[in-house]
Image (spheres, rainbow, N blue to C red):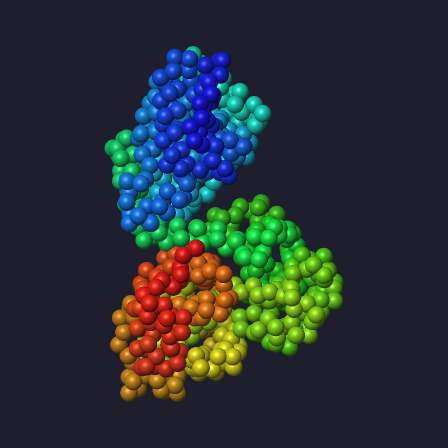
Amino acid sequence: MTKKGSINMEIGNDGVAVITMINPPVNALTLSAIEDLKRCYQEAIDCDNVKAIVLSGADGRFCGGLDISVVENVHKHAGDISLLPDASIGLVVNKIENGKKPSVAAIQGFALGGGLELAMGCSARIATPKSDLGLPELKLGVIPGCGGTQRLPRLVGTSKAVDMLMSSKTITSEEGKELGLIDAIVSSEELLTVARCWALDIVEGRQPNCNSLQQTDKLGPKDESLEILKSARQRHTVPHYRACLDVIEEGIVSGGYSGLLKEDKVFKELVLSNTAKGLLHVFLSERATSKVPGVTDIGLNPRRIEKVAVVGGGLMGSGIATALVISNINVVLKEINHEYLSKALKSVEANLQGFVTRGKLNQDKMKKTLSLLKGTLDYEDLKDADMVIEAVNENVSLKQSIFEDIEKVCTSECIFASNTSTISLDVIGKRTSSQDRILGIHLFSFFPYMQGPDLLANLGVDIFRIDRVITEFGMRLGPFQLQDLSGYGIFLAGVKEFVAAFPDRAFQSPLVQLMVENGREGKKNGKGYYTYNKGSKPEADHSVIQIVEESMRLTNIAPAGKPISVTDEEILEMIFFPVVNEACRVIEEGIVVRASDIDIASVHGFKFPSETGGIMFWADTIGCEYIYSKLKSWYEAYGDFFKPSTFLEQKAAKGLLLGGSC
């Protein structure tokens, strides 16, 4: 038996060397583990007593891929790519794939990223049932760097490989067997025995010694593969996705080894990109959110949530219900009458049908998902809920009465939550004795993000240009189209509450009220800043410019009543720097544990582009001195809305980061 760090090798009497990766919890590949793998492989190849090799992972898991700290370390050392492992050629090609002795991968649990790439370099792959297989690297802003872009198309075909890579989704070992990625599926008890026998069968010629990099039959005609890649480029315009497609094409046109060389070059370039840095930050920050001082560090374990009640089935309530059933949680949706309830249930069904249309859900799965939803008019049906989420209009009295009612029927352990945009949770729970278990679940944007565009409109900046700039930056919708979608009533109610709570930093504008007075309700009645016709994309309605001009006249903040001249970059800054400023207040007031929590809230809460790393990480790439100076100049020119926070001012004065790291 040989043990090298996190790699163990044991040579059996049958002449099979079993090399086991041991690095809990997922057997990730560290730099030392990769070097130890090379040495173990070389020892096995040089040993006269070894006929074949089986590669496995400890504790029921094969390998979760490259340890993310390897890439993190490169970023910390000013982009020193010499810190990246030589695994693609040095290990997989030279030792596993082209070594003198065949290798068989014994996969259990999962083989992800570099783990699957190691397995694809082997002569065969044996797996246990329901094992997960996938290459999720694009989610981190890079491409597979250990041959995945070349071997996967050769094993499953170009079309399926492109689908797996572009979606970063995993497949089961059963699907892998159908596709040709897995050679056999056996029980966990039989796994090593079958893998050893398979390896010896290769030695004796009873099983083929397959070199996946040399296979071409699954690729099909070159023209067909190139057409698949061309079509994928039209759907995936993000640079690192296109780079992945280019690398696949290199292998198809010039051969697998040429593809490997390009893959290695592109991987190293992408590791140093801002996109990779941002997405890695999001990945690490998501993990950090699970660490809450005073909760996770004192041995508390989360209670399983199996049934959630949603009170209110409007746009937000039906959306929350959809998200819950998609996550396999039973939902009771409460409404006040049959008409509203029927409409709410149909909204959820329409949302799920949208998943089907986009290929994210099949029809059978949709039916099973929809079966998790139940509608009710009676609070009694909420009595066994683990959690209740209130999602009604921004009306204090209404919300207070709802929490009074649910307190009467729900258990003492039931978690109460409000989806309020603006109202204090203390006020909402005032008429209950359950204030200690009422929390906020807010699934929408930060307040300044909706006010900033309104202010710009009153300064004469074209509203449709604002939406274009914001969507080009990476937001899914521009703020005015978003306002159409969410409804003017929510915006007006929110402004009312914020003006009352923060009169010194809320911008008051008559624009939305003027829209309502002119018979516009947004998507609700098909007329907003955009026009909405069923079956057609929203179209800019330029007749609203007259309403915007009336609002400009009433607010009278534009210098000399004339529209200001701004660049696209300035539009972006005038909208998002106030959001950064508000986030600084959130940190200063101790509302979050760490600044990176705000990054995750921004990415998941209002879809701030994940490749930027989130709002605070993005701000730190710009520099707080610059952000402070711009806000200060706008504050002096246009008023209190832009007034820099004390926290931001102090950070800028010392030249410090805002803390967008986990």
Answer with the quarter of the image where residue 558 lies: bottom left
In the rendered view, tell whether residue 121 sits above or below residue 432. above
Q: Residue at x 32, y 46 (%)?
A: 74
x then y, percent, for residue 85: 33, 36
Marker count (numbered): 0
Asked whether residue 362 is in view, the answer is yes
Compared across the picture, whether 71 is left or right of 528 comes to left
x then y, percent, for residue 228: 34, 41
In the rendered view, tell whether residue 508 sits above or below residue 8. below
Q: Residue at x 42, y 28 (%)?
A: 4
Answer with the quarter of the image where residue 119 lies: top left
Compared across the picture, whether 362 is left or right of 608 comes to right
Seen from the viewer's position, the closer of residues 492 and 536 is: 492
Seen from the viewer's position, the closer of residues 171 and 37 is: 37
Q: Residue at x 51, y 52 (%)?
A: 355
x then y, percent, for residue 556: 36, 87
Answer with the quarter of the image where residue 621 lies: bottom left
